[in-house]
Amino acid sequence: MIDVIVVGAGPTGLMLACELRLHGVHVVVLDKLSEPTAEHRGRGLHARSVEIMDQRGLLDRFLAVSEKFRAGGFFGGIRKPWPVGVDTAHPYGLATPQPVTERLLHERALELGAEIRRAREVVGLGQDENGAGVSVDLADGTRLRARYLVGCDGGRGVVRGLLGVGFPGEPARVETLLGDMEMTEDRATVDAVVAEVRRTQLRFGALSNGDGTYRVLVPAERVAEDRATAPTLEEFRQRLRAVAGTDFGVHSPRLLSRFSDATRQAERYRVGRIMLAGDAAHIHPPTGGQGLNLGVQDAFNLGWKLAAAVGGWAPEDLLDSYHAERHPVGARVLDNTRAQITLLGTDPGAAALRELFSKLMDFEEVNRYVTEMITAVGVRYDFGEGHDLLGRRMRDMRLRRGRLYGLTHAGRGLLLDRTGRLSVTGWADRVDHVVDACGELDVPAALLRPDGHVAWAGEDQADLLGHLPRWFGAPAR
């Protein structure tokens, strides 16, 4: 029997596969496409996702093929400088096209021993009544068995529907056409027209991809009855002429698609042995570039917990904490994209609100709050009462033996101990103990979960022993 089947070989599914393989979990990734998609939907990683790649030793691979960018408070079309004091050692994002992100994660998953099976379409699934496992039916008549399954198959994927999980929210009210294509118009003219149109229409743009093509966005005339059907190049030309007065001579499209402001979230991220992550769990407009990042961060939260369940040491409610922690995060992203869509409106009220919001973001504290919200640096899980660090992820810091994130590549827990008096005896198979007189750590010791969030801070051994079982199960005999 397979330990975990992951449905969907996008960034979320591949990140999850990597996390599971760090712990030796037998994972099989199924994807209905015969080849990876060439669509450049996600265009980069925000600071929190950059941290994740650093925590797993992947950052150098991304830096080699990406450009850094710094955009503070990039919210509803409002750009501000990067604020002072953002809580990260990586105060930047990476401009990385989604196909590149998928390629790097795909390569890493294979290195770690994941099985990735393409042209495998899931058409049915079920869970054993005794809770022993999951059955998966494929379109070719094959049936697979697994202990757990995670649906990472996107907003239109089948897992959530087969599972019968509700997907409440708001339907599309406005739609935007998105495409990558070449233009005959010169760059200077394109930039001038875009600057003029964006004075009143922020859902319009034409940004160079750096490979001779442009990423073009233009408001659609109406919401399509069948949003799964891609727009035509002629539809792009008509809308460009209507909105900008020119079609820029667009030709040779490489991507033609559409997106809307539809906003929905799964009622539950877990049903028994089946879980949802990424767009299968939540859809929202791409404002702020949060979608791909949110999915990768879902996988980062879930991976070690699911591995613990497979390994037999997970505390009873550890898998339930996935929904408890990530559902509120997803809900907040949906809310901020709703706000951004309002700010992107063209009516006088939206314009007045945008002007007011822009002035508020001139305050450094507001700009920092918005930046940490969009980049997910500000995410804090509710672990109950305790130290201010509790529930926050620990930023990277220099230690005598290197960098903190350099010690987290294996995806294990970590006790960072300045006292030298503490012990994780009984949990050494799950938690590393590092004694280091780090001046940047302003507490005597901190216990980090495999995802870098602080599970305990203090200096009392008895108190530590009271917290270790919550996240790392019973001690080994």
Image: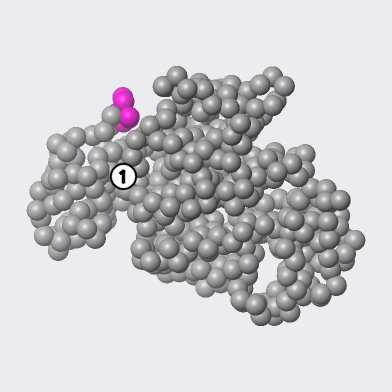
How many residues crowd around disc 1 within 10 Å: few (fewer than 14), some, or many (20 or more)? Answer: some
Q: Provide the major secondary structure of the magenta segment.
A: loop
Q: Position of residue 275 (x, y in %)?
A: 59, 34
Q: Quadrant of residue 260?
A: top left
User: Horizontal and vertical percent for residue 184?
Assistant: 9, 53
Residue 27 belongs to magenta span = no
Outermost residue on the right side: it is 462
Q: Is residue 468 above or below residue 279?
A: below
Please name the residue shown 40% across and 46% down the image.
Answer: 286
Label 1 is placed on what type of residue?
Glu
User: Does any portion of residue 262 appear in the rendered image?
Assistant: no
Q: Is residue 224 magenta?
A: yes
Q: On the image, numbered disc 1 is attached to which residue?
A: 39
Question: Quarter holding the N terminus?
Answer: top right
- Going by the image, does 4 lie left or right of 388? left
Q: Is residue 178 left or right of residue 113?
A: left
Camera-nearest residue between 374 and 471: 471
Rendered residue at 49%/34% (across/down): 7
> Which residue: 72% across, 22% down?
130
In this view, the residue in front, 408 or 268, is 408
**458 sits to left or right of 335:** right
Residue 248 or residue 299, whichever sits in front: 299
Q: Position of residue 177 (x, y in %)?
A: 27, 40
Say which residue appears at 65% left-offset and 77% top-offset: 401
Range of magenta residues: 223-228
